[in-house]
Amino acid sequence: MSNASLPDLKAFIQVAQQRSFQKAADSLGVSRSSLSHAIKGLEQRLGVRLLHRTTRSVAVTEAGEQLLQRLTPLLRELDDALGAVSHGPEELAGTLRINASKGGARWLLEQVIPIFLQRHPHVEFDLVSEGRLVDIVAEGFDAGVRLAESVPKDMVAVPFGGDVRFVTVASPAYIATFGRPGTPDELRSHHCIRQRMPSGKRYRWEFERGTQHLALDVPGALSLDDNDLLVEAACRGLGIAYLPQAFARKALEKGKLILLLEDWTPPCPGLCLYYSSYRHVPAPLQAFIAILRERA
């Protein structure tokens, strides 16, 4: 700490996580030029380049990545300690950052976050919803939320929300025009609405019945990257869709969609909140997990 001030280290973390001087400056409430000057000063004092800069992008160097991974939990613990002192031992303070899938974020907003904010009004809650699976430690998150099958093996996982079921659906108009597939293999002769993953790859539709397991790269002219859009496209008769049942529930109840291949789509393990097993668990996250278990 003798070579670097605490504000400069926090400024570096913001730029490294945002990958943008402008976004980091907006978050910190400073000018872009002053932020750039602070980072240059930090690099000079440490004697190492932390960031690669171009006119269009910012990338973290190997040395910067090492510093980021070690600094993030240390400064988070410092903020928690200062918050605990300033608000008293019984009153939580600080920041809780969670990265979640869209479905996970929706469940938390409905079931957990309102209770948490009511009980702990001095905690700032930062919920980031995105499709890509991120390194929660490297990107400064306290926890992540994904389907159980996607949780990294070295993480502590807290299941919630019960099992999830992926379903195959189509509109009555589509079925009236093109017929109803009786087996997954018959999907090869249908119009399917494909889903593109954040990595750019198309999602393979998975089916299971007894000892039979299939993963199909179905045909289709339309690809989408959002479950709500898949529901809308299927309701418009544009093809057969495959997605978590929770997203299609309202359309199914209203008769806008019909379930297909029901005996081929059994439930599977659902959502988990997960966090690093190698890091200190901050008090706000402990409190959030307690409420999550109450609701789950």
Image: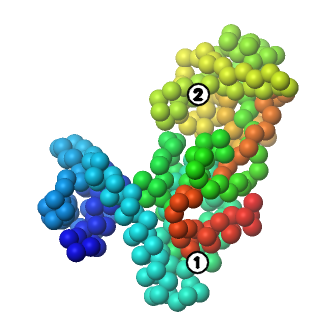
Q: Amino acid at mark 2?
A: Tyr
Residue shown at the point (28%, 67%) measured from the top left: 9
Q: Residues within 10 Å of mark 2 (few under 14, many from 20)?
A: some
Residue 82 image offset from top left, x and y in percent: 43, 82
Q: Is residue 251 visible?
A: no
111 in relation to 121, above or below: above
Residue shown at the point (50%, 78%) measured from the top left: 93
Q: Where residue 120 is drawn, which disc sits there?
A: 1
Q: Which residue is mark 2?
A: 203
Residue 32 image offset from top left, x and y in percent: 20, 60
**Which quarter shows the N terminus?**
bottom left
Mark 2 and mark 1 lie on one chain; the one further toward the N terminus is 1
Residue shown at the point (23%, 51%) measured from the top left: 51
The local secondary structure at tag 2 comes to: loop
Q: Is residue 253 visible?
A: yes
Question: Is 227 left, or right, of 41 in this rendering?
Answer: right
Residue shown at the point (56%, 54%) measured from the top left: 144
Q: Quadrant of residue 16?
A: bottom left
Q: Amino acid at mark 1?
A: His
